[in-house]
Image: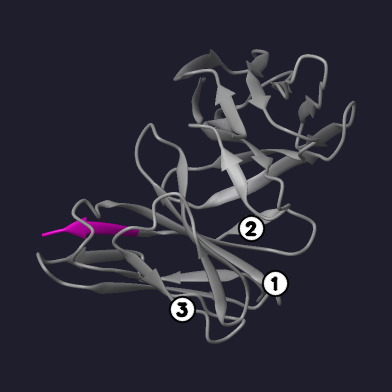
Amino acid sequence: DGGITQSPKYLFRKEGQNVTLSCEQNLNHDAMYWYRQDPGQGLRLIYYSQIVNDFQKGDIAEGYSVSREKKESFPLTVTSAQKNPTAFYLCATSDTAETQYFGPGTRLLVL
Amino acid sequence: GDSVTQMEGPVTLSEEAFLTINCTYTATGYPSLFWYVQYPGEGLQLLLKATKADDKGSNKGFEATYRKETTSFHLEKGSVQVSDSAVYFCALSDLSGYALNFGKGTSLLVTP
C-alpha cells in the first residue's frame, strides 16, 4: 500500500522535553517537507529536504530539527526551545512535477 | 515574495448551490497553481492544478482556470454536496519548483 505514514497520530509533550515526529514514505519521492498548521494561519514550512543527507530551513525552523539519513524517512524533532509547539504537523513529499502529497498529520499537545 | 490570498471564510451554502472561492496570487515568473482540500482531522489532498496561463484544472466537479491577466485561480463548483464540507487551500509553487506557498484556507460548510 503506497503512501505517506505519520506517527503517532497524537503526541503529548511535557515542559523541557524533546519529542520526535515520524514521517515515512514508499512513493520513492526525492523531496520531503514538514509543515506546521495553526488555526486560521494556513500551512507554514518548517524544513524541507530535496535529497538524502541534505535539508534546508523553511520559514519557521527555530526550535525544530530534522535529519534525512534515508530516502524514505524524514523525522522532525520539536525541541524544548520551541516555546509554542501545540499545532498540527504535516509531512509531505513530492516528485519533480511540483505536486506535493501529504500524510495524515500528527497533533502535538503540551501537557 | 510570492504569496497567495484567499477569500476569508467560513462559507456556508445549501446543498446544490454554486460555489466560488476566490484566490489571487503575487509572483515573479510563472508559477504552477494548486487547490488542495482538507477534511477534518486529516492531511491535505490535491484537488486540482494548472501549470500555465489559461490552463483549466478540474476534478470531482471542481474547476479553476489560471488567469494571468487578473493573477487569479478561483475555485468553482456548479452544485455542492454536504460531503464537500472541508477547508480549501490555494497554493503556488515558488521559483525553485519544489516548495509551495499556501493561502490561509477557506472553510466551506454545506448544509442539507
* Label 3, label 2: how far apart the Cα atoms are: 20 Å
Read off the magenta span: A107-111
Kindly identify which residue carries mark 1. A29
Q: Quadrant of residue B101?
A: top right
Mark 2 residue type = Tyr
* Label 3, label 1: how far apart the Cα atoms are: 16 Å
Q: Position of residue B7 (x, y in %)?
A: 54, 18
Badge 1, how many Cα within 10 Å: few under 14, some, many 20+? some
* Label 2, label 1: how far apart the Cα atoms are: 10 Å
Counting residues from the start of the chain, the first of labels 3 and 2 encountered is 3
Q: Position of residue B76 (x, y in %)?
A: 72, 21
Asked if disc 2 and disc 1 are in contact, CB closer than 8 Å, the reply is yes
Residue at disc 3, secondary structure: loop
Kindly identify which residue carries mark 2. A101
Residue B92, can we see it?
A: yes
| Main SS, magenta residues | strand
Q: Position of residue A79 (x, y in %)?
A: 25, 68
Residue at disc 1, secondary structure: loop
Badge 3, how many Cα within 10 Å: few under 14, some, many 20+? some
Seen as rendered, the residue at the extreme bottom is A69
Nearer the observer, A28 or B11: A28
Give the residue drawn at x 21%, y 51%. Answer: A84
Counting residues from the start of the chain, the first of labels 3 and 1 encountered is 1
Output the chain of dot 1: A
Nearer the observer, A48 or A74: A48
Mark 3 residue type = Ser
Residue A67: assigned label: 3
Side (left or right) of B56 relative to A34: right
Q: Position of residue B61 (x, y in %)?
A: 77, 30
Counting residues from the start of the chain, the first of labels 2 and 1 encountered is 1
Q: Nearer the viewer, mark 3 or mark 1?
A: 3
